[in-house]
Amino acid sequence: MGPASRWPAATGGLIGALHALLTVSLALSQHVAGLGLTMLATSLASYAYRVSFPKVDTPPTVEPFAPMAWLPIPVLGAQTPLTLLALLLVR
């Protein structure tokens, strides 16, 4: 594991420690502190993206899975492979 792969764990640990400080030490509401930290982390990630990639006009997009029209069952044929996998994994 390289040094770059430790950044997400360290960031999560710092945000968790900040959440613990806010909720345990300062007795703030867990919901309010969690929502505030989520908005803070989202804003910081967006800012870091814009600073790291200044010439990118549009953010990257994710191509969705195509529906499985080849399945003979109409309801399942309209679903994606991940939906079918989730249905198969349910007991």
Image (cartoon, helix red, strand yellow):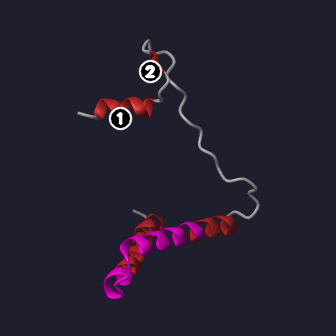
* Residue at (68% x, 65% y) in the render: 50
Q: Which residues are magenta?
A: 21-43
The image quadrant where one finds the C terminus is top left
- Disc 1 on helix, strand or loop? helix
Q: Is residue 27 in the magenta section?
A: yes
The majority secondary structure of the magenta stretch comes to helix
Residue placed under numbered mark 2 in the picture: 75
Left or right: 6 in relation to 58: left
Residue 33 is situated, as x and y percent measured from the top left of the image, at 43, 75
Q: Is residue 51 in the magenta section?
A: no
Residue 68 is situated, as x and y percent measured from the top left of the image, at 49, 22
Residue 19 in which image quadrant: bottom left
Residue placed under numbered mark 1 in the picture: 86
The image quadrant where one finds the N terminus is bottom left
Between 3 and 18, the one lying in front of the other is: 18
Of pointers 1 and 2, the one earlier in the residue sequence: 2
